[in-house]
Amino acid sequence: NQGYLQITKKIFQSKEIPLDLKLQHYREITANRNFYRENYFQIRDLAATLRVEYPADYEVLEHYAETLIAWGDVEEAATLFKSYLSDTITDIKPYENVPDL
């Protein structure tokens, strides 16, 4: 698994491979919860790699936040979502009364 995930990281760092293929692959490798649990740190590293390469992509943010939540870092995940929303929403009024997580 280590070698496979190291190769996957290199693929995720590649500019030649489109993001949609990287996300499809990420979804496939994280669909198996046992694999996810056994390789959590490497998968978290993959999600962080995508986050660095595609900081403005919402699906990438979701996957990275999921790894944070799996680790128990819910506050950091909530901060990421709030930051994304504040950067992308022009009319914040409907969201002002939404309670914090």
Image (spheres, helix red, strand yellow):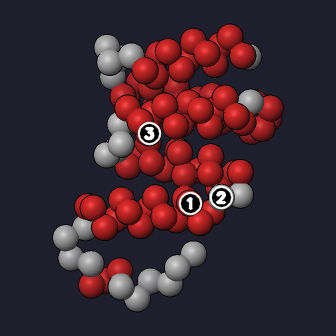
Q: Secondary structure at mark 2?
A: loop
- Secondary structure beneath label 1: helix
Q: In the rendered structure, are the residues bearing label 3 and label 2 in contact, judged by CB atoms less than 8 Å apart?
A: no
Q: Position of residue 48 (x, y in %)?
A: 52, 37
Q: Residue at x 71, y 51 (%)?
A: 71
Q: Is residue 32 visible?
A: no
Separation of residues labelled 1 and 2 (CA atoms): 6 Å
Query: Residue 2, which numbered label?
Result: none
Q: What's the amino acid at mark 3?
A: Arg
Q: In the picture shown, does residue 1 fall above or below 38?
A: above
Q: Tag 1: residue type?
A: Glu
- State the image quarter where residue 31 is shown: top right
Check disc 2 and report the residue beneath it. 73
Residue 17: % across, % down:
36, 17
| Kind of residue at badge 2 | Asp
Residue found 57% across the figure and 75% down from its top: 101
Viewer-nearest residue: 62 or 42: 42
| Residue located farthest toward the bottom when viewing the structure as drawn | 97
Seen from this angle, which residue lies furthest left? 90
Q: Gap in Å between the C-alphas at discs 3 and 1?
A: 14 Å
Residue 56 against residue 83 in the figure, above or below: above
Tell me the residue that label 3 is attached to.
51
Query: How many marks on residues?
Result: 3
68 displayed left or right of 93? right
Precedes in sequence: disc 3 or disc 2 = 3
**Numbered badge on residue 76:** 1
